[in-house]
Amino acid sequence: MRRLWAFAVVILLALPASAAVPVRVAVVANRYDSVEKCLQACRIPYTVIKYADLNHPDIYRRHDAIFFPSGMEPPPETSINILSRGTSIQGVTLREGHYELDRKELARKLRAFIDGGGSAYFSGYSWDILHGAYDDFSFFYGFPYIGSAGTIDLRLEEDLLGFVSSPRFSAHMPFSGWVAVKSISNADVLAGGRFDTPRGQKEGPVIVRLKRKRGEAYYTGYYTGETGNPIMRFLVIRVAFGRLLASLEAGAGRWDQTSGVRMVDMLLPGETSRRYTVPLKKGRNTIFFGSESGFFQADVYSGDALIASRQTWEREFALDVRATAEGMYGLRIFPAGNGRSIPYAISVKHGVRLVPYFRRVVLAFLFFLVIAALVFINRFMNPRKYSGRAR
């Protein structure tokens, strides 16, 4: 029996990353954002679709995540024919096959996709598609394209801070005319900073998350084809495997704790572990972990001291951590066996875990207690109404 158990463990450890449920990812063909390089570096399969395909409803049914990179729309000069004799222009016509999207229909389909649980990525000049769906963007002087070339000292926040494990990141903007956002309503700012414009320095968000009903959309004014860039890694994996995080959150939310940082990642070839920075509250905290395949170990550090650890043959587990003080703690993830290129999700919660849906149980108890009290008071105030008559 022991030999059979050992053999089963060896087989499980040898399972490749492809054993996971394949994610359905689409990337719109573009000219400026090399997000495909980052997807390839993370070994995430994807399908390239055309800009003209975005009004087809099947595109949104067949995919869980869609990347809308900067420069999707074909340039005008590629869509026209110019008839001329010498320097005299005789006529201008649209080329055969030219296609113009119905923006209102696109906005409707995009809203339905994101609200229904889909994940979407937008960068640079694709802001107008996201704005058309939710009307959230605001710009300096009402004009988007005023960002000057140079370096921005980004201040990282929330999930991105935990993923990169640094509060600052130097982002190089290689060209002028990039989209400088003043604000985005109903959005979580993951990175922002001060940047140069032709009308002086301005400050605004550069990377944001828009949580809309069951899904999420991410917009970034900073993008690069560098495969080792931690910000691009965060965005690509988070969008591609958004449903994995949503599944983990559905289970973690049963305990009615306060939400903390959330991350999605994977170990790439050559990596032996991954380390993050997670803010913990004083007292009880819980780190929820989930993956579609493979097994992992989670260690929590206060400085260099190990304060909590768990390694289990379960794909979803919870690690309870008691923090002696509120602050930033280290979280390191180790794979067991062939655990690389397997996506996993992390969700940090604060507070004590008592029983699932504890708040609902308490509210239901209070509701019935109030009903019982009202019935008792009514009977006390009107005793004859409930008295019986002897026959």
Image: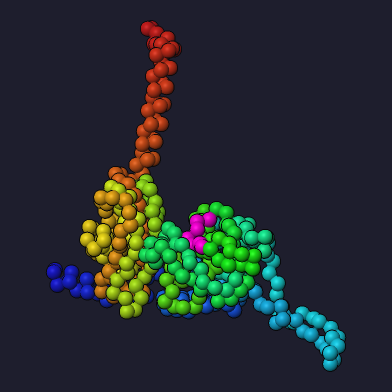
Regarding residue 109, the answer to whether it shows in the image is no
Quadrant of the image for the N terminus? bottom left
- Residue extending farthest to the bottom is 86
> Left of 218 or right of it: where is 104?
right
127, 302: nearer the viewer: 302
Looking at the image, which residue is at 33% across and 60% down? 289
Residue 189: say if magenta: yes
Rendered view: 246 above or below 352: below
Looking at the image, which residue is at 58% across and 57% down? 183
Quadrant of the image for the C terminus? top left
Q: Position of residue 225 (x, y in %)?
A: 49, 78
Q: Position of residue 319 (x, y in %)?
A: 27, 56
Rendered view: 283 above or below 156: above
Q: Position of residue 385 (x, y in %)?
A: 44, 12
> Left of 47 or right of it: where is 146?
right
124, 391: nearer the viewer: 124
74, 362: nearer the viewer: 74
Residue 50: say if magenta: no
Looking at the picture, the colour scheme in use is: rainbow
Which region is colored magenta?
187-193
Looking at the image, which residue is at 71% across and 78% down? 76
